[in-house]
Amino acid sequence: MRYPLLSLFSSIFFAALLLSCQTPGSISRDYQRALETNHELQNDDQTTLLILVDGLSSATLSTSLKNSNAPNLKSFFRLSKAGDVSFQLARSSFPSLTYPNLTSILTASKVSEHGITGNRILVDGKTVNFENVLAWRTLDQLVEDHTVFHELTKQNKTSISYSYPFPRETTAHVEKTLQAGADYLDQRYTEIDTASITSLKRLLSETSSQQWPRFIFLHLIGVDALEHQYGPENERVQTYMKSLDEQLGEVFEIVAAGSADHETRTLLTADHGFQRIDKGLDLTSIISKLGSEIRLVQDNRVASLYFPTAMPLAKRKEIAEGLLQIPELQATVLRMGKELRVYARSDKALTTDEDLLWPALEDFFKAPNAPDLLLLPKANIDFSGAYAGNHGGFTSEEMLVPILSRGFKLPDTVFSTSDLLRLLKLMP
Ligand SMILES: [Zn+2]
């Protein structure tokens, strides 16, 4: 996620002023009020807490565990086995960006099904950028009726969302407040995450565990923001991981105590991993020289081309192959009807885990709004030029994410995070 709340200030500053300031106890209060006023709401003796640490790569988590920056994660999720500290991996949806993956996880559907093919997508020929808070209305329209929150509401079951882009149809949720906007603008990521965690602690301790919501979604954004700004290997990321671990430790204590008389399943995963970025590449002028009618969408570490329908296949192949002359590109993937053709530099694999990840790329191209040609840069290149770390590409570092569980047995194989809520039987 890239500065999603910035535009609160540029565009809807005055609207934001009208929003009331959310206090740490307000979600707990909203939830209590909902239980009191709607007697049909059920709590069916089970709670699932899903913690999504935005951008937490397996490398970052490994370093945290190795350097003793995540002792609470290690003990709560029992990551230490026979002297070894290890965790399971899951496969992200492609592209390894926030909005396709949040949507895949919360709707338990594939990119080909929900159509959120990037943080930037083409809707009726226009680019909609979900990194801008104003585009969240379009996101709402595209995913409404498909989320786990909708599903639970339909069954009169309770849910809470601590995720700014996904508040709809929950029993209670975080509000876009002026304070949250100001915190993001001033890069006080810790304070946004801390506000969410503090609010969750209040909710869990002020509600008897039998009354805990059926599903709680906690979306933490600080790690992603720091990895973008300083790069995934920067020490600031580890310092923040340590602080996050301390705060989550307090949540885990309450959860563990409440689990004595209430079944609680806690999971922690990420929407995508990260790559260090050494150089940005802007394709605008190169693509415009190929023809003014070709549409280009540059989205972090992935770029999409849409050709005019009349363009012959031979011309498409020529472009797909020709663009590989750009030294920063690793591969281009051309859609030819139902077939995909990969043009890769010097026959190298796209990634070391190609077999494992290939289904995600194939699924992407089945989306109704999938591009005709996909451009994948080399590992440490992006199409933004604004960040020290980025993601969106097809490398294992971006596509394979940690998945930790307590109270629920995960499959032994690497599964897609889009299957997670179905495995948990929260989605049909
Ligand atoms: Zn993200």
Image (cartoon, rainbow, N blue to C red):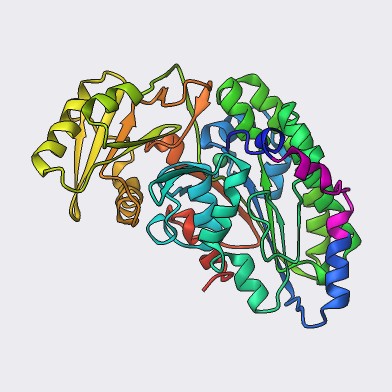
Q: What x and y, as percent, mark residue 95?
A: 41, 43
Residue 210 belongs to the span the image colors magenta: no
Q: Is residue 334 above or below residue 159?
A: above
Is the residue 254 above or below the residue 127 in the image?
Answer: below
Figure quadrant of residue 425: bottom right
On the image, the x and y values in percent for residue 123 come to 43, 51
Residue 356 versus residue 231: which sits nearer the camera? Answer: 231
Residue 47 x/y as whole percent = 71, 66
Task: Determine whether, in the image, residue 132 is placed left or right of residue 419.
Answer: right
Q: Quadrant of residue 80?
A: top right
- Asked if residue 82 lies left or right of residue 418, the reply is right
Instruction: Tell me if residue 4 comes above or below residue 335 in the rendering.
Output: above
In the image, residue 66 lies at what x, y percent? 61, 30
Q: Quadrant of residue 35?
A: bottom right
The image shows a total of numbered marks equal to: 0
Residue at 46%, 62% in the rendered image: 109
Locate the N terminus and report the quarter of the image it occupies.
top right
Q: Residue 118: tell me if it is visible.
A: no
Tell which of 308 and 101 is nearer to you. Answer: 308
> Relative to 266, does residue 386 appear above or below in the rendering?
above
Question: Residue shown at 55%/26% (left/top)?
Answer: 232
Residue at the far left: name it. Answer: 314
Examine the rendering and report whether any part of residue 35 can be seen.
yes
Which quarter of the frame holds ligand 1? Answer: top right
Q: Give the magenta part as a residue range.
A: 12-28
Asked if residue 21 is among those painted magenta in the image, a careful observer would answer yes
Taking 14 as reference, is 81 left or right? left
Residue located at (69% from left, 36% from top): 70
